[in-house]
């Protein structure tokens, strides 16, 4: 094993701040350099999977759209199914819907009503948690289906917006982030 493999992967330097995107006053955290790095995506996925191994997770739910990029490979490595939480009008069958607040507005997510069963053990995965609204909406969709939430996992957490407090008001499951921005 080389010396660099003995040290944890340095994620932070591969996340780029984009000021005033998508609206003035918002600092967008661009993870595309991280996931396009020859080691970045696998390091993120492997670390998330290692953290939640052995919990019996059989489904991963990822939110549109960057949650798909991380959630699908996490599901694959866990040997679990992947359920996309999509924007309205993107799913062709009957859906559960959940509105939520964003850092800069409101939105809605949906999952197919037959995507999860009450026996499913679910990990909610996304690239970033800011205000906690998207994660909370995703978890509420899982709850509507009767499935059990096992935890939440993110590449990036904007700690200064206190998303853990928002999520923890309704869900007691673990919240795991690779990078915390203070």
Image (spheres, grey):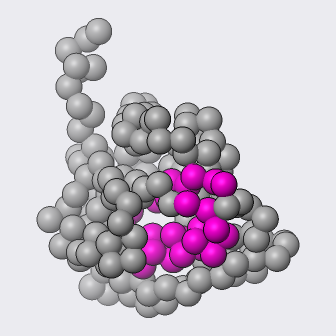
Q: Is residue 129 above or below residue 96?
A: above
Q: Quadrant of the N terminus?
A: top left
Residue 182 seen in the figure: yes
Residue furthest out toward the left: 182
Residue in the picture at 67% in, 46% down: 81
Residue 90 in the image, given as x and y percentages of width and height: 75, 73
Q: Is residue 131 above or below residue 122?
A: below
Residue furthest out toward the bottom: 105
Q: Which residues are magenta?
A: 119-148
Q: Quadrant of residue 146?
A: bottom right
Residue furthest out toward the top: 1
Q: Is residue 6 above or below residue 89?
A: above
> Is 129 situated left or right of 125 in this image?
left
Q: Of 58 and 27, which appears nearest the observer?
A: 58
Residue 26 in the image, given as x and y percentages of width and height: 30, 80
Residue furthest out toward the right: 93
Q: Of 169 and 9, which appears nearest the observer?
A: 169
Q: Quadrant of the C terminus?
A: bottom left
Q: Is residue 158 above or below residue 9?
A: below
Residue in the picture at 85% in, 72% down: 93
Residue 170 in the image, given as x and y percentages of width and height: 39, 77
- Does the magenta-highlighted stretch encompass residue 126? yes
Total labels: the figure holds 0
Residue in the picture at 40% in, 34% down: 50
Residue in the picture at 29% in, 62% down: 157
> Is 32 situated left or right of 109 in this image?
left
Residue 64 seen in the figure: no
- Does the magenta-highlighted stretch encompass residue 129? yes
> Is 162 situated left or right of 71 in this image?
left
Q: Of 6 and 79, which appears nearest the observer?
A: 79
Residue 2 in the image, given as x and y percentages of width and height: 26, 11
């Amino acid at each position: 094993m080389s010396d660099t493999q003995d040290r944890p992967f340095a994620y932070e330097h591969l996340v780029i701040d984009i000021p005033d995107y998508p609206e003035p006053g918002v600092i967008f955290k661009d993870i595309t350099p991280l996931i396009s790095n020859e080691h970045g995506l696998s390091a993120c996925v492997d670390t998330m999977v290692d953290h939640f191994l052995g919990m019996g997770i059989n489904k991963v739910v990822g939110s549109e759209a960057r949650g798909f990029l991380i959630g699908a490979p996490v599901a694959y490595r866990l040997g679990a199914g992947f359920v996309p939480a999509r924007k309205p009008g993107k799913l062709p069958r009957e859906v559960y819907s959940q509105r939520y607040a964003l850092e800069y507005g409101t939105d809605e997510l949906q999952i197919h009503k037959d995507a999860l069963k009450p026996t499913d053990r679910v990990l909610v995965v996304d690239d970033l948690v800011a205000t906690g609204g998207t994660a909370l909406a995703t978890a509420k969709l899982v709850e509507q289906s009767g499935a059990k939430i096992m935890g939440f996992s993110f590449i990036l957490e904007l700690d200064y917006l206190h998303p853990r407090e928002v999520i923890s008001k309704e869900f007691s499951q673990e919240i795991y982030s690779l990078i915390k921005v203070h």
